[in-house]
Structure formats: structure tokens, C-alpha cells
Image (cartoon, coloured by chain):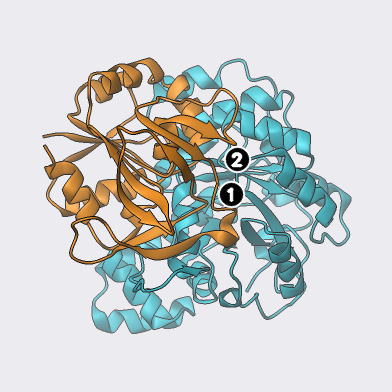
Amino acid sequence: MKVGVLALQGAFGLHEQVLNRIGVAAVQVRTPEELAEVDRLVIPGGESTAISKLLDANGLGDPLADRLADGLPVLGTCAGMILLAAEVVDGYPGQHRFGAINATVRRNGYGRQSESFHAPIDIEGWESAFPGVFIRAPVVESVGREVEVLAELDGVPVLCRQGPVVVSSFHPELAEDDRVHRWFVERE
Amino acid sequence: MAAESISGRETGTTLVKRGLAEMLKGGVIMDVVTPDQAKVAEDAGAVAVMALERVPADIRRDGGVARMSDPEMITGIQQAVTIPVMAKARIGHFVEAQILEALDVDYIDESEVLTPADEAHHIDKWAFTVPFVCGATNLGEALRRISEGACMIRSKGEAGTGNIVEAVRHLRSIIGDIRKITQADSAELFDWAKQLRAPLPLVREVAETGWLPVPMFCAGGISTPADAGLVMQIGAEAVFVGSGIFKSSDPAPRAKAIVEAATNYRDPHILAKVSRGLGEPMPGLEIDGLETRLADRGW
């Protein structure tokens, strides 16, 4: 299995490191040709405005939409979650919104950097809490019925799944805990 | 990333502060002096803006004492864009930093571009919730800033010159010494710490990991997409562009081109494409002809 990490901007290097650590060959994706070769994709945190523009600049907008429509398993963290969501509040005009998960997210919903935080996250069915790191993170305001909420923090969803699409408002690549990545690459 | 046990909900931790720097990697941080320029930067795909009253080229031209920007101007820029907003405090001026923290900026640059306020001490950056970036010309300087709590290092270069040579020198010095340290044995690391005037535990960490414990970006003299490609291929993880955009003849397309260059820095065909027809870059200065060497500020 070939796992790609969208490497336009942001924490793609850290995702790659975690994947390599758990024995998965990860490749950086910057072009449509590279995207065509991957079986799973991680869309990392970063600035969603910048990543969105770079998707256009590198001709990846339509190919990514097509792969998502074909059911490409994808993990979107923070900015990745914003790009995959159906609705974005306080987004940047014209920003890509792939609508791969039926959720409404508020960009920078947790506030500026002074409000960035970490907190233990209880994930359904997991033995111990996962270290959640939230950096100028998006807030999930609502999800559709087809979305499964896997973890909440103070009543707000922070880890969600809809079919092959998994999104988190926190950054599993910043934690020294590879369980989210393992789960993403091992799930059917 | 530094191991840190996560038990309760906490803000301002090392993990959270270094985390924002991780999110800016592969991106371009642009100096802006007005809300309109900040919009141009955001539209071009900047990952953050640095709000200041004058770009380094003008600070250099005007001379005199350069200080923290007017809070009103910083607030105006915060209101204009959705991306992170950084601002500069003078070296050692911890009260300017307190004010910038009160303004809720996302990152503080303790910067040699402003006139230093303290000739011996940098700011104790551990005392703040807001993260700091500091400049460095060599590995010792970088590790001293990290020991004071900096969560991002940028090579200093020579700001406001449009001349990349100093940035390249600083990057090569930092990365070259990191390579040497990874080859050193445990006894030699004591001497490295002494030579670098840097704390031994940080020197050991660099020897073990082969990199700084925080992201390293490049600043000072970047004015073309090729410049961005050059410093990224040498090893910078993102770039700051100061005067290079808004002192050029046509800022918006140049800003966009530098953003695309930072992402596609290994692809000469894309670099060739984005470098076309950008108009005049900012006027450049020879380093030997400078009255003030900003990179010499900091200790």
C-alpha cells in the first residue's frame, strides 16, 4: 500500500515521519501524477488558504476531487479537515471545499495562537487518551447524520469519519503517539 | 518534537508554540505595512504576514531608531486577514513583547531589523504564552536563542538588501556545523558546546537528531522565486520575504510566484515557469557598501 502525504505546504514532513516510523512507505504528493499513484492520502495541517491556492497552481484541484469521489481513503488534519468539509464558516472566499465529509467547520474557531492548546482526547473504544494538539484549530459546528463522531472535546466533535474519510481538528502528527496513523492505514 | 506529557488542557506549552512553526513550513511569510498589503499577501498564498511600519529597506534608508510598530497598525492588519499575524519587538525589549502579546499577535519576532534595546540580554521567551522566532547567523547563536525559549529560528541574512549572499552564508554555517556535530563523539561534544557557547544538552540533542529542535526558516535578502528555491534546497524549511515583494515593481504576481517556488523548490521547470515576466525585483545592495550590518546585532 502506498500512502501519500499532500506536500504543498504545512506539516507534511511530520506526517511522513510518523508513517515511516510505523513501517509505511509514505510519498510526498505535489503533482497529479504523484496523486494518481497513491492508495491513501493524508492532507496535513498548514494554512488552508495557502494549500487551497497551491492545489490550483499545481493542477491538483480536479484530480483530487475525482479521487475523493472515487472513495480514496483520506485523513485530513486541521487545514486538511477544512478542505474536506462541506461547509466552512469564516473561510477565505474561493477556498477549495471538497465536501468529502458532511460537516460544517469554523476556521480558526478555537481562536488565535494564544488560544492554541493541548488536551487529552478520549477516542471511542481506545484504551487510553490520545494527546490532542490544537493549533489555531477549526471547530466542528455541526455534522450530518452520515458522519460518525469518534471523539469529542467539551461536547464538540474533534475526530470524525464518513466512509473512507477521516478528519481531526487536532494534529496527531505532533504527538509522540502513532495510534491515529496506525488506525488510518490499517482500517479496511 | 519534544516529549511532553499531556494530562490537562493547557495553552502556551512548548509543543503548542513549536507546533505553529511546524504548520508554517513550506510556506512564505511576508512583511506588510498596511492592511491592503496584508490582503495582497493573503491572496497570493502567504502562510502568515509580518506587520511592521517600514520594511527593512526603508528602515535601512531612513536610519535612526527603529521600534515596535504602532498597535493600531497591527490591529488593522489582524482585522484584514485570516492567516497568522506576526510582529517585531526589539532585541531584549521584553515590554514591547508584552504589548505584542496583549495585542494577541500569533508570533513575535525578536528582530535585529529593529534597533536593539539591550546590549547583553535577549528576551526570556519562556515567560510568554506567545511563541517567538529569532534570527541567527550560526549554530551557537541559534542554540542560545532556543535555550532562551525561541520556538523557530530564521537565518538572519542581511535584511533590506535584496542580496541573498548573507542568508546563504548563515544557512550554510548552521547546517554545516549540524552535520559536523552529528559525526562528533561524546567527548568532542563538550568542546563543541564550549566553542558554540551553547548549552550542552541542546548540542547533544542536535548531535542525536541531526537537526535543530525547532524549525529553521530563512530570512534576509530573498527577492526572487529562484532565491526561495536556493535557500529551500540548501535546507531552509520556509522563507520570510521582507522588502523583496513590496519593493518590487509588481508585488502581487511576485508574491504568488515566490509562494509557488517555496512549494516546488526542487522542480526547475516550475521555477522557470513562475519566474517569467515578474517585472523588476527590488533594487539590490552590495554587502561591502553597507553602513549598518543588521546581522551583527544580537549576542
Q: Amino acid at mark 1?
A: Ala
Image coordinates of residue B140 in percent, x first then y, are 49, 71
Q: Amino acid at mark 2?
A: Ile
Front-most of A187 and B43?
A: A187
Q: In what quadrant of the picture does the C terminus of chain A appear?
A: top left
Chain B: colour as depicted: cyan
- A59 to the left or right of B82: left
SS for dot 1:
loop
Q: Is residue B81 above or below residue A55?
A: below
Q: In what quadrant of the picture does the N terminus of chain A appear?
A: top left
Dot 1 crowding, Cα within 10 Å, few <14, some 14–19, many 20+? many
- The residue singled out by tag 1 in the image is B219
Chain to which the residue tagged by mark 2 belongs: B
Residue at the image position 63 percent from the left and 28 percent from the top = B43
Query: Are both tags, 2 and 1, on one chain?
Result: yes
SS for dot 2:
loop
Chain A: colour as depicted: orange
Chain to which the residue tagged by mark 1 belongs: B
Q: Is residue A128 above or below residue A100?
A: below
- The residue singled out by tag 2 in the image is B222
Residue at the image position 73 percent from the left and 39 percent from the top = B80
Front-most of A123 and B47?
A: A123
